[in-house]
Image (cartoon, coloured by chain):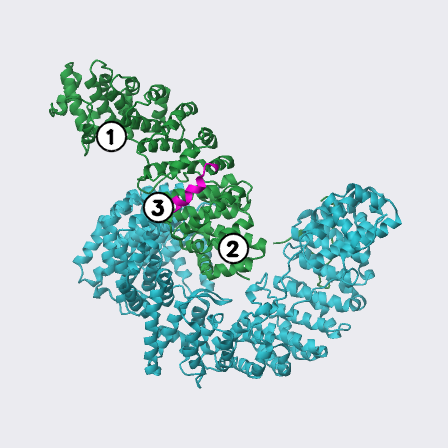
């Protein structure tokens, strides 16, 4: 492309079109620009345009296009390959680097920012080696006196240097920093001093001050970057200059710089906040050198806190400043700075208490943005808030001064409570602060699951609870002082492990009552608190509260929970739904009388939310609740399954027909649960669905796979004969699903679940013709991409096959695929890998299978396979004697979504749809060790002398000892 | 290089215990320093300034005959002239200028071009005062930058000074020792030039039971400079010659002599394992360990460095240091008030923790865990960084029981707090340590308990926050811990096709199998 006016004109046209709202015009223009960006001079034309175009829109558009072009193309990845050619020719690169800095500096701010970004992208690749004069070019501008230019340079420098804050130390990085320091540190220091000087000569010039303070902010940021990796010699030598000035700036105020905006932080706040960061950096990393300055900063920062207002715009500054104090007060050698009773009192009174106050903004959030409020307050996403910072400072101070701090605050808490008592409707915020203060003072450690786990022993939590929390919750109106209600409920929630059970028991009806509160926060907290209380553990791993203790409340609890779902704003409230689930699980059969109404409400809810599922947790707990209803009811009355099917199938059909992807995995799980409840042959309604379940489209979604496999297993368990007789033509499709799954490393175990069910339940003749194919497939996986998981499943499967069809059948089918295959599998797979099998049932299947190979497979006795007999026996004894897997007892009541292994959004396993563990050899063999002994005995009777010789001569001593133990236990001997 | 360096180490973490020696970290990772030269390093070159020198000035009559100040021109003239009296005056005047406290005119004197003459004066055995003044002046020139030292060496000073070592006048031979020390301190080339000119035998000959302490200090310092610097290291046979004398000097009662001897040993051990072995073989470790516990900072510092270097070596060398009692002394040093000692001690500990689990066990038995945890909690940041490495190494190489012991010592809280460190590498090493703790917890079936502990101690929210860290490796490490403990690929050949009925087609081609 020539650098011609014609080309400039063309480019202008196309740039203009890229701004068109109509995609039919915009897209082709974007395509065109992309197609010419490899041409020489293209970037230079853009630069010319952004400098000279008459239209501001085009200038800005050109600058953005230029920056994106640099972002995409400047970096040359290794050697230019076909599809990643170097699109920017060398001469353009040189020209860009020669012109971009002055161009950036002379451009208006909007364009300056784009070019500054572009420079930092180029700098990331070329600086310093391939752009040696960049630094000098920038530094010389410091003397220009033009702060528009200076700020451009500072901004660029900031974007170039800020990576020093997160990159790892390396020779290359430090060489660059050293180079930068050499050229930049002194001019920056001079600029810093000069800028401060100018600030004092321009104290009455608002617009000048704004520019100067923007510079100071950038300078303070650069200071942070340049000092991050280590303390540079230059800055150590000039610490006095920097720290004295930083200190002065912290204490500075100027009316002209104060902003009216309540939300957005102004320049003064941003600068002070950055200075707090800088001081914190030095305090953390260069304590030895910074020590002389630190006390001054502590004083300045707490004075700053004392004088800073409650507006939101100060939030970042205040929380940064408090965090600084919190980090310093924990250090033993600064303990003395805080030790004085007056200091402590003043910090408590003037820094902590004011920042714990419930502000207008909090009140707004409480009422209008309750979801956000709950997230911050309950789930701890409050890291940057003032309250949180104040709370951290309390904890920091308590490390050394727990007694005095508790003492000071007790006084405050009392006086705030008195204020409240004088006139609750006006002074309720005092009580809120008092509760917050007690909470932060008392809680030393906390988890979501257990609430407070370590408490300050100096605070009497139960007394406070009885005197100040319960009375609020007992008040006749659930809607009065909603914030205090929420505080009280939260108090129960987090101190549930500290408050005695009898007090908690008294609170339960109060919490149930507050489910009716209009405030979203209040009824949500009430639901959440009930849910948490119901998951508390008593002795022996049972729940702390028993179903019997809850009996008086069942009806009102269920009624209020479901009613709460009808309150405005809570129609998909996950806390309420979780509380429903937990209540069902706790109350068990006492909910049965209410099931007809409950299941109606749940199906209606299901129908409603399936139109547009948006709350995954809510949905999950809803399905869990449905499963619980089914399980609890059918356990008492198996015939009730029909009425559930009647209630649910219509909605399920709708979900499947509309392909509501989020719900399909759940539907399959509920259907599995229902199908498994049937005692007799599979109902025809299910059979009609069978072909649809084999549709590839369902299996392409990973989230469907586990529940669909589970469902097909249920089909096979209940209806294998029906499938063999009425749907034999679908067997290849069923095996196709198996093949699909086995091809995937992620899903192969699911394929094996399916295959195991097929082998176990299908009549043998119905799968006869496919058996060889099945094994060939498995061998291919074994050959090409075996994994431990695959091998484990494979071993279980072949042993199950052996149990079902006999060892001889196994040997014959292996050897029919390839001669000597059986020996190879024994030697290379079974013997070396069998110890990896885990799970009691799995181990048992393998034990019985191997016992059959040892004792019921003639080729093991008479062919070249004979040499494998002892190693196989040895491996089997190893399998027996491996330490048992300590499977965790059934704890499904306590389960959380987050706890479910392998939880992912695509598939959410329902704990309460859980499948009972199935033991296919259960009836056949009780004790596999005895079974081995008896089988060996039988074998030795059939061919006397051989087995005895075998094992006594070749088995290792330890294994022999174990084996003799089995024989003894079975009261048999080998002949 | 950063990435590869780290992934190297990560690899080692994964190969638990396979190559524990490789976990040990040599002293220098980065050659470029941003900081001021360390204040506690030994001085490379020293200038002999007048006030200090005059107090002990062996030059007789100086106080009686104050030196007449001369102009530079007069100096040149006198030095180049043949009047011995004037030569002495001019040389003395030069020496005086070079010995003043502030801004000695090193460059100007060099520019006068009189260095070859001053070197020549060194050979005037008949004129001891002139020899002495010239030697002093040259010593001070050599104490400057490399340029300055080079001017002296290129003036032919090396052989002249070496001969002067055997001067009958002790103050002259002492001055020669000093000058040679400055030349040796310049760096490997001159150090080796001196060694090749056979400086060692006459130098060692000066060490005797009757050598005055002041003189012996100078000799020791020069000897230490002959041991100093890497790339290349001093030749092995030179080291073998120097070692026995250094070992003797280590027994001296003067703390400065001991200090410089320790420095010498710290240089000799700052290298490959075979160099460490030479020092270990002398059996000096127990003495070094004893000196590590010295109340004198100038002794403790280099002794700690030397022992710290030894434990970067093989497991056997580390064991030798353990047998010498290093683990009994380290707790004191970890609790030392001086940050640089804390740091050095923690570095030493981190390398011992990189050893096999038997050594880790000794570290536990000797009570190193409480001071380690304390340091992690409230040490200086430089020391905390090293302590984090110690934890990482410990959790990589330790047995499950040992890791449990570490957790019971309270390591978790300070470790998690360091996730707020303003240093990406430290954060990453903490995250690695946490992963190691989880691996141990998994083996014990205590994952859930560890999760709760991490959450209780405020660790979870810190790890969560790191998922937005600017450093890729940090964020990935954080993410992987979250995904693995705190939250809840395909084989195309085997994929089935679909049939006319739209279902999967079950089919497979047979191939030959060989597992």
Q: Is residue B472 above or below residue A386?
A: above
Residue B339, numbered label: 3
Question: Chain coloured green: which letter?
Answer: B
**Residue at x 25%, y 25% (from the top left corner):** B139
Q: Is residue A49 visible?
A: no
- The extreme bottom residue here reads A476
**What chain letter is assigned to the residue under label 1?**
B
Q: Quick one: quadrant of the N terminus of chain B?
A: top left
- Label 2 crowd bin: few (<14), some (14–19), many (20+), radius 10 Å: some
**What chain letter is assigned to the residue under label 2?**
B
A729 and B139: which is toward the camera: B139
Question: Chain coloured cyan: which letter?
Answer: A
Viewer-nearest of discs 1 and 3: 3
Q: Position of residue B262 (x, y in %)?
A: 37, 33
Give the main secondary structure of the magenta stretch: helix
Q: Quick one: quadrant of the C terminus of chain B?
A: top right
Q: Is residue A872 magenta?
A: no
Instruction: Tell me the quarter of the picture where residue A371 sits.
Output: bottom left
Residue B47, numbered label: 1
Q: Is residue A552 above or below residue B237?
A: below
Q: Position of residue A501 (x, y in %)?
A: 51, 74
- Write the start and end of the magenta stretch as one range: B323-338
Residue B480, numbered label: 2
Q: Is residue A530 visible?
A: yes
**What chain letter is assigned to the residue under label 3?**
B
Q: Is residue B15 above or below residue A528?
A: above
Q: Are marks 2 and 1 on the same chain?
A: yes
In the shown orientation, is residue B27 left or right of residue B89?
right
């Amino acid at each position: 492309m020539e650098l011609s006016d014609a080309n400039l004109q063309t480019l202008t046209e196309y740039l203009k079109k890229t701004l068109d709202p109509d995609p039919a015009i915009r897209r082709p223009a974007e395509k065109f620009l992309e197609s010419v960006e490899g041409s020489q001079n293209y970037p230079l034309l853009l630069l010319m345009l952004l400098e000279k175009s008459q239209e501001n829109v085009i200038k800005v558009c050109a600058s953005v296009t230029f920056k994106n072009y640099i972002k995409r193309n400047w970096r040359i990845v290794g050697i230019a390959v076909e599809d990643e050619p170097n699109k920017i020719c060398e001469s353009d690169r040189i020209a860009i680097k020669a012109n971009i800095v002055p161009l950036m500096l002379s451009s208006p701010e909007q364009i300056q920012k784009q070019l500054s970004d572009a420079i930092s992208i180029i700098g990331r690749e070329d600086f310093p080696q391939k752009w040696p004069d960049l630094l000098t070019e920038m530094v010389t501008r410091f003397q220009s006196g033009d702060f528009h230019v200076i700020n451009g340079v500072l901004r660029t420098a900031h974007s170039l240097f800020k990576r020093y804050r997160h990159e790892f130390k390396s020779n290359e990085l430090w060489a660059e920093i050293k180079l930068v320091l050499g050229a930049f540190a002194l001019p920056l220091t001079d600029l810093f001093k000069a800028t401060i000087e100018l600030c004092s000569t321009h104290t009455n010039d608002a617009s000048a001050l704004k520019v100067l303070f923007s510079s100071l902010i950038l300078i303070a940021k650069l200071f942070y970057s340049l000092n991050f990796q280590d303390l540079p010699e230059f800055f150590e030598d000039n610490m006095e200059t920097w720290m004295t000035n930083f200190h002065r700036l912290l204490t500075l105020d100027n009316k002209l710089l104060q902003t009216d905006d309540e939300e957005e932080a102004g320049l003064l706040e941003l600068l002070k906040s950055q200075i707090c960061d800088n001081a914190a950096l030095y305090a953390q990393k260069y304590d030895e050198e910074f020590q002389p300055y630190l006390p001054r900063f502590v004083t300045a920062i707490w004075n700053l806190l004392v004088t800073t207002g409650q507006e939101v715009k100060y939030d970042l500054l205040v929380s940064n400043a408090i965090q600084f104090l919190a980090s310093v007060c924990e250090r033993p050698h600064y303990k003395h700075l805080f030790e004085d009773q007056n200091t402590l009192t003043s910090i408590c009174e003037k820094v902590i208490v004011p920042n714990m106050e419930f502000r207008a903004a909090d009140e707004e959030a409480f009422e209008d943005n309750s979801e956000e409020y709950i997230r911050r307050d309950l789930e701890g996403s409050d890291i940057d808030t003032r309250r949180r910072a104040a709370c951290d400072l309390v904890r920091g101070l308590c490390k050394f001064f727990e007694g005095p701090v508790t003492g000071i605050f007790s006084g405050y808490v009392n006086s705030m409570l008195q204020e409240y008592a004088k006139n609750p409707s006006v002074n309720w915020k005092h009580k809120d602060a008092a509760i917050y203060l007690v909470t932060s003072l008392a809680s030393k450690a906390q988890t979501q699951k257990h609430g407070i786990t370590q408490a300050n022993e100096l605070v009497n939590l139960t007394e406070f609870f009885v005197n100040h929390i319960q009375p609020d919750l007992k008040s006749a109106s659930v809607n009065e002082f909603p914030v205090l209600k929420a505080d009280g409920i939260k108090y129960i929630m987090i101190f549930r492990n500290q408050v005695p059970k009898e007090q908690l028991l008294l609170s339960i009806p109060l919490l149930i009552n507050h489910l009716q509160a209009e405030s979203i926060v209040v009824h949500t907290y009430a639901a959440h608190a009930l849910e948490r209380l119901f998951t508390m553990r008593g002795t022996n791993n049972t729940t702390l509260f028993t179903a019997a203790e809850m009996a008086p409340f069942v009806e009102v609890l269920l009624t209020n929970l479901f009613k709460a779902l009808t309150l405005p704003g809570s129609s998909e409230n996950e806390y309420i739904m979780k509380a429903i689930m937990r209540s069902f699980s706790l109350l068990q059969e006492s909910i049965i009388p209410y099931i007809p109404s409950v299941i109606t409400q749940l199906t209606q809810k299901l129908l409603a939310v399936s139109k547009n599922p948006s709350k995954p947790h809510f949905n999950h707990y809803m399905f869990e609740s449905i499963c619980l209803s089914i399980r609890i009811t059918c356990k008492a009355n198996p015939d009730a399954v029909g009425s559930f099917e009647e209630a649910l199938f219509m909605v399920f059909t709708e979900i499947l027909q509309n392909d509501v992807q989020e719900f399909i995995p759940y539907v399959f799980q509920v259907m599995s649960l229902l199908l498994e409840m049937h005692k007799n042959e599979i109902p025809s309604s299910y059979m009609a669905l069978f072909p649809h379940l084999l549709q590839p489209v369902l299996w392409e979604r990973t989230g469907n796979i586990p529940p669909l496999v589970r469902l097909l297993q249920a089909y096979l368990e209940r209806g294998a004969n029906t499938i063999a007789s009425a749907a034999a033509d679908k067997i290849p499709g069923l095996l196709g699903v198996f093949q699909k799954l086995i091809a995937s490393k992620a899903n192969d175990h699911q394929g094996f679940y399916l295959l195991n069910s097929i082998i176990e339940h299908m009549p043998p003749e119905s799968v006869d013709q496919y058996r060889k194919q099945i094994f060939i497939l498995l061998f291919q996986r074994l050959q090409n991409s075996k994994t431990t998981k695959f091998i484990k499943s494979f071993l279980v499967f072949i042993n199950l096959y052996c149990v079902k069809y006999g060892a001889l059948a196994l040997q014959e089918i292996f050897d029919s695929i390839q001669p000597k295959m059986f020996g190879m599998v024994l030697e290379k797979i079974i013997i070396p890998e069998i110890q990896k099998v885990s799970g009691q049932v799995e181990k048992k299947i393998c034990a019985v299978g191997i016992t059959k190979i040892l004792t019921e497979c003639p080729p093991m006795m008479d062919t070249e396979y004979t040499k494998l007999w002892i190693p196989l026996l040895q491996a089997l004894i190893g399998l027996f004697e491996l330490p048992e897997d300590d499977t965790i007892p059934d704890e499904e009541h306590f389960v959380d979504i987050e706890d479910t292994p392998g939880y992912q959004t695509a598939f959410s396993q329902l704990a309460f749809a859980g499948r009972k563990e199935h033991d296919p050899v259960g009836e056949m063999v009780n004790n596999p060790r005895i079974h081995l002994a008896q089988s060996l005995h039988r074998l030795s009777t059939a061919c006397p002398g051989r087995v005895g010789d075998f094992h006594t001569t070749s088995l290792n001593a330890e294994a022999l000892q174990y084996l003799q133990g089995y024989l003894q236990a079975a009261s048999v001997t080998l002949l | 290089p950063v990435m590869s360096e780290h992934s190297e180490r990560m690899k080692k973490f994964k190969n638990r215990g396979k190559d524990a020696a490789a976990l040990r970290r040599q002293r220098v990772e980065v050659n470029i320093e941003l900081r001021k030269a360390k204040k506690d390093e030994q001085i490379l070159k020293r200038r002999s300034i007048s006030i200090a020198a005059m107090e002990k000035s062996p030059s007789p009559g100086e106080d009686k005959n104050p030196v007449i100040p001369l102009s530079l021109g007069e100096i040149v003239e006198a030095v180049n002239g043949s009047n011995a009296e004037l030569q002495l005056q001019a040389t003395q005047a030069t020496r005086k200028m070079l010995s003043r406290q502030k801004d000695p005119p090193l460059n100007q004197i060099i520019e006068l071009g009189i260095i070859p003459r001053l070197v020549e004066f060194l050979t005037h055995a008949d004129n001891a005062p002139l020899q002495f003044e010239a030697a002093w002046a040259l010593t001070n020139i050599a104490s400057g930058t490399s340029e300055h030292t080079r001017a002296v060496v290129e003036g032919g000073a090396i052989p002249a000074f070496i001969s002067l070592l055997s001067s009958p006048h002790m103050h002259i031979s002492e001055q020669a020792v000093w000058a040679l020390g400055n030349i040796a301190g310049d760096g490997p080339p001159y150090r080796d030039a001196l060694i090749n000119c056979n400086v060692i035998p006459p130098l060692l000959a000066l060490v005797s039971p009757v050598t005055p302490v002041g003189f012996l200090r100078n000799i020791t310092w020069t000897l230490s400079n002959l041991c100093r610097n890497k790339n290349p290291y001093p030749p092995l046979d030179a080291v073998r010659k120097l070692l026995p004398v250094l070992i003797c000097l280590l027994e001296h009662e003067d703390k400065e002599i001991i200090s410089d001897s320790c420095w010498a040993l710290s240089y000799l051990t700052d290298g490959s394992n075979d160099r460490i072995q030479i020092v270990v073989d002398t059996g000096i470790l127990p003495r070094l360990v004893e000196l590590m516990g010295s109340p004198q900072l100038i002794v403790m510092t280099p002794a700690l460095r030397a022992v710290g270097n030894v434990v970067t070596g093989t497991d056997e060398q580390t064991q030798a240091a353990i047998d010498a009692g290093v683990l009994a002394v380290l707790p004191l040093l970890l609790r030392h008030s001086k940050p640089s000692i804390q740091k050095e001690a923690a570095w030493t500990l981190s390398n011992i923790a990189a050893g096999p689990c038997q050594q880790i066990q000794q570290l536990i038995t000797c009570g190193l865990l409480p001071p380690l945890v304390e340091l992690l909690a409230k040490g200086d940041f430089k020391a905390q960084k090293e302590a984090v490495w110690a934890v990482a190494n410990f959790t990589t190489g330790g047995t499950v029981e040992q890791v449990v012991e570490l957790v019971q010592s309270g390591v978790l809280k300070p470790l998690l707090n360091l996730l707020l460190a303003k240093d990406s590498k430290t954060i990453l090493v903490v995250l690695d340590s946490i992963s190691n703790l989880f691996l141990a917890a998994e083996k014990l079936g205590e994952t859930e308990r560890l999760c709760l502990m991490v959450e209780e101690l405020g660790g979870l929210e810190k790890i969560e926050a790191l998922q937005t860290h600017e450093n890729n490796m940090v964020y990935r490490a954080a993410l992987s811990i979250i995904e693995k403990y705190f939250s809840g690929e395909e084989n195309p050949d085997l994929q089935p096709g679909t049939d006319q009925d739209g279902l999967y087609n079950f089919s497979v081609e047979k191939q030959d199998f060989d597992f």
